[in-house]
Image (cartoon, rainbow, N blue to C red):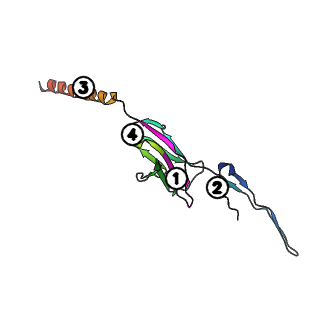
């Protein structure tokens, strides 16, 4: 049995077993065992649309790896080192919709295995809505109600 520990991406490759021969009085047997292709990969947090967003946008965080994992893989999300409880059915993907200032920080994900596999942290920056946005929204509301009042006055005459 071959046991590899502390793997890095540089350990990826084909591992071949030695050829062996079994010899008995009248029987000769040779075996070429097939090799094993090992892909060592890490987890990575990907953010869509980007790692810098404005409040109220939708942000999708995906725990990504270059090799496929089984559908029943369990993922854990962390924000600033503390576990995040995702909404149901958001295991590999964590959706922040709408994103708020409190969501800013360093995100990482992990795959639950006997030897947990963790991603590195990736920063999410959430910028506050400018003061002009609430003012513009207020002006829009005033104009909307003003137009509605004028239309109501014209309709009741």
- Measured as percent of width and height from the top left, residue 45 is found at 52, 45
Which labelled disc corresponds to residue 3? none
Mark toward the viewer: 3 or 4: 4
Residue marked by disc 3: 143
Could you tell me which secondary element the residue under label 3 belongs to? helix
Chain-order first, disc 3 or disc 1: 1
- Measured as percent of width and height from the top left, residue 122 is found at 51, 43
Q: Are marks 3 and 4 in contact (CB under 8 Å)?
A: no
Mark toward the viewer: 4 or 1: 4
Chain-order first, disc 2 or disc 1: 2
The residues bearing labels 2 and 4 have C-alpha atoms spaced at a distance of 37 Å
Seen as rendered, the residue at the extreme left is 157
Residue marked by disc 2: 6
Task: State which region is magenta.
Answer: 107-127
Q: Are marks 2 and 4 in contact (CB under 8 Å)?
A: no
Seen as rendered, the residue at the extreme front is 81
Residue marked by disc 4: 101
Q: Are marks 3 and 2 in contact (CB under 8 Å)?
A: no
The residues bearing labels 4 and 1 have C-alpha atoms spaced at a distance of 24 Å
The overriding secondary structure of the stretch rendered in magenta is strand
Could you tell me which secondary element the residue under label 4 belongs to? helix
The residues bearing labels 3 and 1 have C-alpha atoms spaced at a distance of 50 Å
Residue marked by disc 1: 110
Chain-order first, disc 3 or disc 4: 4
Mark toward the viewer: 3 or 2: 2
Query: Quarter of the image holding residue 115?
Result: bottom right
């Amino acid at each position: 049995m071959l046991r590899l520990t502390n793997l890095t991406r540089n350990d990826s490759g084909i591992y071949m077993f030695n050829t062996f021969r079994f010899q008995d009085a009248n029987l000769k047997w040779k075996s070429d065992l097939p090799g094993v292709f090992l892909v060592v990969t890490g987890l990575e947090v990907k953010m869509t649309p980007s790692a810098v967003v404005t409040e109220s946008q939708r942000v999708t965080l995906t725990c990504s790896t270059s090799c496929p994992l089984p559908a029943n893989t369990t993922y854990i999300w962390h924000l600033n080192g503390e576990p995040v409880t995702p909404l149901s059915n958001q295991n590999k993907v964590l959706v922040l919709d709408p994103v708020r200032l409190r969501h800013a920080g360093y995100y990482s994900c992990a795959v639950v295995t006997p030897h947990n596999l963790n991603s590195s942290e990736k920063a999410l920056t959430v910028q506050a809505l400018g003061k002009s946005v609430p003012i513009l929204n207020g002006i829009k509301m005033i104009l909307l109600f003003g137009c509605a009042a004028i239309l109501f006055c014209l309709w009741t005459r």
